[in-house]
Image: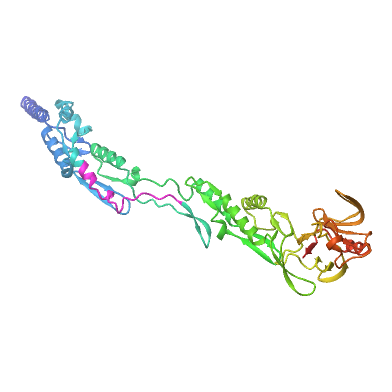
Amino acid sequence: MKQHRKKILIGSAVLFSALLFLYLSLAFYYQSRFFFGSVINGIPYSGKTVEQVENDIASKISDYSLTLVGRNSISAKLSAEDIGYHYVKDDQITKLKEEQNAFLWPLALLHPADLAMEATTDYDKKLLEDAIAALPFFDPKVNIAPEDASIIYTEEDGYVIRPEKENSLIKEDVLKELITDSLETGLSSIYLEDYGCYEEPAYHSDSPEIQKALKKAKKYTDLTVTYDFGSRNETLDRSTLHEWVSIDEDFHVSINEDKVKEYISYLNYHYTTFGISRQFTKQNGKTITIRGGDYGWWINRSAEAKELLSVIKKGKDVTREPVYFQTAASRELDDIGNSYIEVSLKKQKLWVFIDGELAMDSDIVTGNLSRNYGTPKGVYSITYKERDTALVGEDYNTPVKYWMPFNKNIGFHDASWRSKFGKDIYKKSGSHGCVNMPPKKAAKMFQLITKGMPVIVY
């Protein structure tokens, strides 16, 4: 029994000595090495010395490269060698090691050390500048500025949006900062688009400014304005209207009012007949040219320009007549029409036509030529009709029953004081310019004619 105890004690002493030797040996071992299971920045460094860890880090950094991925499938790689990128040894690894208590190595078996540090690196700034400048992203063939979405006019669809083009213009300062930050953090790849390295269009297809401008531009042009000139008309649509619309760089839409006025001047030139010379077919079938008078259509250009501008801004189809200073009997090329009064000074006779048919005729006495009171030639219109009035002048005050003026204070009226009409009476014994008529004829004409009826005097 005593021998058995002695063996147990000796065996225990030997085991204890062995364990103590192992413990002390490993403690001594870990005096210069990292514990079992130690990880630095995710890399296992079990049993490595500071120098070995530093050499490994230096090796890995020397193998470092940064991949840059850009638009249009363009990519580039910056290697450590290209830019002189290298590890700078400092006391970080030593400090991590010194924080380790070698005599506590058994605890590492239960709780492996997960350590972290930021490796100190450096690079050649000149090499980096050169490497960045040589990147394919700066090739003029691809380094193209973005294009804003815009509004364009097409014959088929009118105003439409031309989409923006992103293209691939690099923000050089942003890219440089991104690369230097990546070198400091050890990032191995970056997608330039994710970091805002490209210039972006200021306006996109769905930008509110563009959508609002498109709506207004289409409103101003997707309409038809039809001007009614009897059997003739003028149509104004987007093929012309788009030339009047301007869209500035901030997408403000405006209408060129000068263009509007030019168009009204065009209408005025082609459809105003006031004061023009006319071809007139007399009652005997002969055609003459009539000049003078104040008859005819006369467009009020300033008023109509305002009206047309208002119509365009409303953006609705419309058929209209211009605003006129003065109108005439017919809107056809022959604006005299088929109802008119024809006066021949030579024959001292007038004819009244209603709807193309002779309704009456009459001998007359016109202005006294010997006293320079001759009745003016030209085309006029009946200003108004009045019963029982007096014609007043410097040397006369004459009552009449039927007064039908057509040229200011010159008009048709009954002349009860005359017993004869026609022939050459007017040359020496004519009126002050009016057209004298027999009372019965004046009464009949008064009933036949209307205000505005043309009067042709030749």
Q: Is residue 71 left or right of residue 82?
A: right
Question: In this figure, which colouring scheme has been used for the structure?
Answer: rainbow
Q: Is residue 151 left or right of residue 25?
A: right
Image quarter of the N terminus? top left
**Residue situated in front as seen by the camera: 165 or 286:** 286
Position above or below: 440 against 95? below
Q: Quarter of the image holding residue 419?
A: bottom right
**Residue situated in front as seen by the camera: 126 or 84:** 126
Residue 29 percent coordinates (x, y): 9, 30
Residue 363 percent coordinates (x, y): 88, 67
Q: Is residue 351 left or right of residue 115?
A: right
Residue 303 percent coordinates (x, y): 67, 50
Q: Is residue 74 left or right of residue 124?
A: right
Is there any visible trace of residue 47 in the rendered image? Answer: no
Give the farthest residue toward the left: 3
**Residue situated in front as seen by the camera: 112 or 383:** 383
Is there any visible trace of residue 76 in the rendered image? Answer: yes
Q: What residue is shown at x 24% (from left), y 49% (from top)?
A: 76
Residues in magenta? Answer: 129-149
Let me know if residue 68 is in the magenta part.
no
Callout count: 0
Q: Quarter of the image holding residue 21?
A: top left
**Residue situated in front as seen by the camera: 177 or 85:** 177
Q: Quarter of the image holding residue 117?
A: top left
Image quarter of the C terminus? bottom right
Position above or below: 154 against 206? below
Q: What residue is shown at x 16% (from left), y 35% (from top)?
A: 36
Let me know if residue 147 is in the magenta part.
yes
Q: What residue is shown at x 72% (from left), y 60% (from top)?
A: 292
Q: Overall secondary structure of the magenta stretch?
A: loop
Residue 456 percent coordinates (x, y): 78, 64
